[in-house]
Image (tube, rainbow, N blue to C red):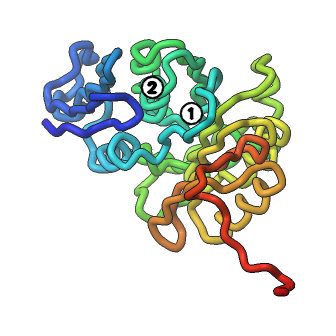
Amino acid sequence: MWHIALRPQPQASISMERDPPVKAQSGDNAAAVVTLAAQSKDRRFDLTIPNIEGMRYVAKEIFKDHCYQPVPRIAAPRSVLDIGANVGLAAAYFRLAYPDAVIHCVEPDPGALSFLAQNGPVIGNCIVHEVGLYEGDCQMPFYSSDNSVISSVARNPFAHATSIPIQLRDAGAFVSSLGVEGFDLIKIDTEGAEVPIIRSLGQFMRTAAIVHAEFHSRDDRRAIDDLMNPSHCLFRGVIESAHRGHLTYVANPLVTYEKSEAPLTIPRDPP
């Protein structure tokens, strides 16, 4: 068992137990799954996740490194769109950080969906959508890996994935069909498909208070920044390597700062 402090909530912690989940499906190998217990000062829930190293890495990123930590001086989101929800770890973090938010989880990978379907009701007020998003309706090969955190329409040389055809929905049209006026927070982690999805979401992206986006290539990092810059300010980022990292954007009208954070510039025309 290991314990991790969760800063957004006082005295919060997360633990992972190697015991099989209480509601394991018949025939499941107990070693194939673990129970992840996430809790804050006021809430606790147990999530069922695959017992693989990649999932532990994602849990560390989210609950220890706080890649989705709340942005200071921004009102708590009431509506969250989690694109690339996987098994629900990010949604669980958002639930602890934003207890009253409605969370829409979008995930196409069949392996991840089986866990997300179990975890969604545990997280609460969490709506699961079995769909893959892109820019325009299209069919593409989907590389489904045993390690679902790297499943994607982009081929990953480390995924050892099986290619299956998948029908993708236009992201903007799909989100419009939800009947939601907008989302206060949008998170996108789609293992290489972030740029076309951001382009398709258009106004939904421009009106979101907070956007968390992963990038999986240097070119995508630059493209994401170009797409977000007219409406948002890059507030925080973690660059893991040249082609991997997390970016957090805040809508331009909402950007505030303490005196110690004020911009420092040299006048272009010195006196």
Write the residue at 59% across / 58% down. 261
Write the residue at 63% across / 50% down. 257
Write the residue at 25% across / 39% down. 4
Q: Which mark is residue 116?
A: 2
Q: Position of residue 132 (x, y in %)?
A: 65, 37
The kind of residue tagged 1 is Glu
Q: Is 187 or 232 nearer to us in this picture?
A: 232
Q: Position of residue 179 (x, y in %)?
A: 79, 17
Q: Is 97 or 224 nearer to us in this picture?
A: 97
The kind of residue tagged 2 is Leu
The quarter of the picture where residue 46 lies is top left
- Check the image and report above or below for 196 versus 113: below
Instruction: Look at the numbered discs 1 and 2 and tell me whether their residues touch, using CB distance below 8 Å.
Output: yes
Write the residue at 70% across / 37% down. 209
Which image quarter is the N terminus in?
A: top left
Name the residue that disc number 1 marks: 107
Dot 2 falls on a residue whose secondary structure is: helix
Distance CA(mark 1)–CA(mark 2): 9 Å
- Specify few, some or many for label 1: CA neighbours under 10 Å numbering under 14, 14-19, or 20 or more: many
